[in-house]
Image (cartoon, rainbow, N blue to C red):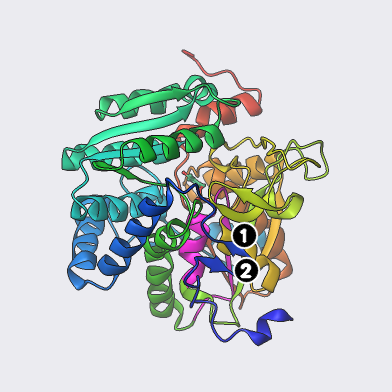
Amino acid sequence: MADDLINSFMSGPDENGRFGDFGGRFVSETLMPLILDLEERYAHAKSDDSFWEEMDFLWKHYVGRPSPLYHAERLTERLGGARIYMKRDELNHTGAHKINNVIGQIILARRMGKTRIIAETGAGQHGVATATVCAKFGLNCVIYMGSHDVERQAPNVFRMRLLGAEVVPVTSGRGTLKDAMNDALRDWVTNVRDTFYCIGTVAGPHPYPAMVRDFQSIIGRETREQMLEAEGRLPDTLVAAIGGGSNAMGLFFPFLDDREVSIIGVEAGGKGVNSDLEHCASLTGGRPGVLHGNRTYLLQDDDGQILEGFSISAGLDYPGIGPEHSWLHETGRATYVAVTDSEALAAFQLCCETEGIIPALEPSHALAHVARIAPTLPSSHIVCMNMCGRGDKDIFTVAKALGIEMLGT
Ligand SMILES: *Cc1c(COP(=O)(O)O)cnc(C)c1O
């Protein structure tokens, strides 16, 4: 296995922002100085204790960290095998992990003297988290969102507007997340002086994938400590859902050098990875290419055109995946699997009924894989999954998928 040759999986990326053959900075000459400036400012902040003290304070008092590590006893009993734990990041302010990262980038933006924050959003979760933290600090906030998503995600668009953000519908390309990210990059080049671009996942040109990973790693650091306290040892298996891959990188990163811990990322299999692109599994069903300033696995056709994926979960339908995941996949340090919409729906219902927790559809994909493997494992085996978001936003989608009509809708 290739990973025997690697001393540490936690040392990347290299000075060019590369994780093996992946990552890097594939950007125009006009964008390059912005990226280099950000890299320098982040490197400086990262080694400054007062930066992390400010993060810790906000994580604790504004986000509600640490999130609990919860032993799901009835689910464990129902599945009849491995002991199942959930990292409860759905309990964060705004209902998901996204705010962990937004807090970090906005503290950095403030230190850089920026007064205008821009972001892209797909389903609207990152847009809401960004608008939230901008409201808290009195910063101007502009959110780029595909016009198609603006229509599909009306409640999140309204939330962002309530929080004082301007939502810009993107009509270029096909009007989706990929196009929103391109427009945000263009805005950044045009408004360099006062603007900070806050990216929502471990994608984009270097230093974004590493920076977002560093901010989300609070999830894995807490899990490690809490697991040692609860069980006196590390978990045997970690499982997390993957859109761009930030909640997964956040959980996985602090465990990468613990080779005895097996690591599994779960992609959105939609109607099946063999179906005619009605899925969003970049690693399981894509191949390497360049998108949004980095080289990684992508959903693309034979001519290299980026394809739109499909998933019942709007938060998982990014056509790429963070470059660090592509590297973990190629080195064999992590394993990536796909879960279909119907498997995720079944896991969603199982979680509601056995644990009294309504999960978002994204972590329902991780849970579905837990439900596959737990019965095959002994009761001494500990599985920990990332419950990265709550399901309030998804109840209408679930009702529709189950063919249930809600009163008053
Ligand atoms: C946005 C989102 C995701 C997908 O993003 P990652 O960067 O892969 O974590 C997953 N789950 C929830 C709840 C989200 O809001």
| Tag of residue 77 | none
Residues in magenta, as a range: 234-253
Q: Secondary structure at mark 1?
A: strand
Q: Identify the residue under disc 1.
A: 265
Quadrant in which residue 168 is drawn: top left
Amino acid residing under circle 1: Gly
The answer to if 391 sits in the magenta stretch is no
Quadrant in which residue 337 is drawn: bottom right
Disc 2 or 1, which lies upstream in sequence? 1
Q: Secondary structure at mark 2?
A: helix
Residue at 55%, 37% in the rendered image: 178
Furthest residue toward front: 29
Amino acid residing under circle 2: Leu
The answer to if 249 sits in the magenta stretch is yes
The picture places residue 208, in percent across and down from the top left corner, at 43, 56
Q: Is residue 395 found left or right of 69 in the rendered image? A: right
Residue 386 seen: no
Q: Identify the residue under disc 2.
A: 328
Q: Is residue 320 above or below residue 255?
A: above
Decide: marks 2, 1 in contact (CB < 8 A)? yes
Q: Is residue 175 found left or right of 97 in the rendered image? A: right
